[in-house]
Image: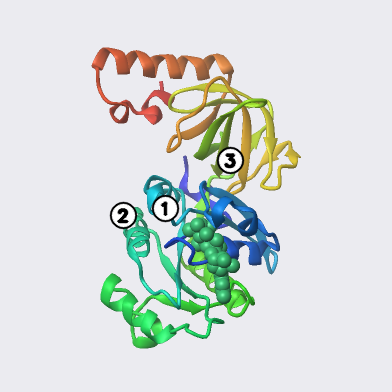
Amino acid sequence: KEKDKLVPRPPVVTVMGHVDHGKTTLLDRIRSTRVAEKEEGGITQSIGAYQVEVNGKKITFIDTPGHELFTEMRARGAQATDIVVLVVAADDGVMPQTIEAYNHAKAANVPIIVAINKIDKPNANVEKTKQELVEKLGLIPEEWGGDTIVVPISARTGQGVDELLEMILLVAEMNEIKCYPEGPARGVIIESKLDKKMGPVASVIVKDGVLRVGDAVVAANTYGKVRNLFDDRMRPIKEALPSQPVMILGFEDVPDVHSNVYAVESVEKARNIVEKRLERLESQKQTKKHVNLEELMKM
Ligand code: GTP
Ligand code: NA
Ligand code: MG
C-alpha cells in the first residue's frame, strides 16, 4: 500500500465514562433520538455505533456501557476508535469507571476530550470536577495551562454540545485520520451475535475501502459472503464507506469481536484462510492470539 493513496475519513469517536453520567443521552441529543429512555433499567448493555453529520462533516460515534460489569466492551470501544470523549457528570465527578475508561483510552493511545455533563443540575460543580480530573487522572484542562480540552455540557438542555462537536472535528483534523479508500475493504468487528432469524450478525466499522453486498469476507474464526448490509438505522444499503458503521449478514458463524474483517477475492479464499488458521492453531497448540490473521491474508 502506498502512503500517498491515503485520504481523510470521518473520525470514529467512542463515548466513555461512569455509569449514568449521560453518554447515551448525549448521543441521543446529537442524533435527535431517544435510546436512553428505552433501555432496560436505564443501563446501556451493548456497544452501539452511529454516524451523524455536523456542518457537512461526518462523525461516527460509538456508545459504550458505563456499568462496572462491562470492562471488556469499554476496552473494545477504545481500541476501535480515533478519539475518546470522556463523559464526567458534574454532580458526581470522577468515579471508578471514569478512571477505568481513561486507562483504556490511554492504552489505546488515542486523544481524549472531556465532556463535563449535567451542568444544568443545581448541584453541578464544574470547578470541582476539573480539580478531580487533575488529581485523579492527571488531565490538566487547557484553561488551566494544560493540554486537555474540557467542554462543560448539558446533554439534557443541549448547552455546550455544539462546542463539543466543534472540538471533536478540530481534534480529528489535527490528528489526520486517514484511510486507504481504494483496494479491498477492511473493518473492525465491534459486536457480534447469533440472531434467531438472521443468523450470525456482525456490527462493523469500515476502516479502509468500500464494503459491498456480495463481497467475500474473512474474520479470525469464520468467513462468508455479504448477503445484506444495514446502516445505523437498520436501512438496507448496498455499500459501506470508510468509518461507516454497518451490520453484516452472511457469515457462516458468529465472528469474534476484536477481529478485523477483510474482503477477499472469493469465498473459497476466505474459507482457505480460516481453515489454515484453525490448522495452525491445532498444530501449534498456541492460543488464538499467536496465529495472526493478517499474516495468513498474505499467503
Ligand atoms: P450507562 O450507559 O448505563 O452507563 O449510562 P449513560 O452514561 O449512558 O447515562 P444515560 O444517558 O443513561 O443517563 C443517565 C441519567 O442521567 C438519565 O436519567 C438521564 O436523563 C440523565 N442525564 C443525562 N444527561 C443529563 C444532563 O445533562 N442533565 C441532567 N439533569 N440529567 C442528565
Ligand atoms: Na444509564
Ligand atoms: Mg448509556
How dense is the environment of label 1, judged by Cα within 10 Å: few (below 14), some, or many (20 and up)?
many
Q: Is residue 14 visible?
A: no
Spot the residue most to the front.
41
> Which residue position is annotated with label 2?
107
Q: Is residue 223 visible?
A: yes
Looking at the image, residue 72 lies above or below residue 292: below
How far is disc 2 from disc 3 in space, using C-alphas? 27 Å
Quick check: is the Cβ at mark 3 less than 8 Å away from ligand 3?
Answer: no
Image quarter hosting the C terminus: top left
Give coordinates of residue 242: x percent, y percent.
59, 47
Looking at the image, residue 54 lies above or below residue 8: below
SS category of the residue bearing label 3: loop
Q: Which callout, 1 or 3, points at the residue further toward the start of the chain? A: 1
Indicate the amino acid at tag 3. Answer: Gly
SS category of the residue bearing label 2: helix
Q: Nearer the viewer, mark 2 or mark 3?
A: 2
> Which residue position is annotated with label 1?
78
The residue depicted at 54 percent of the width and 32 percent of the height is 193
Identify the mark at residue 209; answer none if there is no mark: 3
Looking at the image, residue 224 lies above or below residue 179: above
How dense is the environment of label 3, judged by Cα within 10 Å: few (below 14), some, or many (20 and up)?
many
How far is disc 1 from disc 2 in space, using C-alphas? 8 Å
Q: Are marks 1 and 2 in contact (CB under 8 Å)?
A: yes
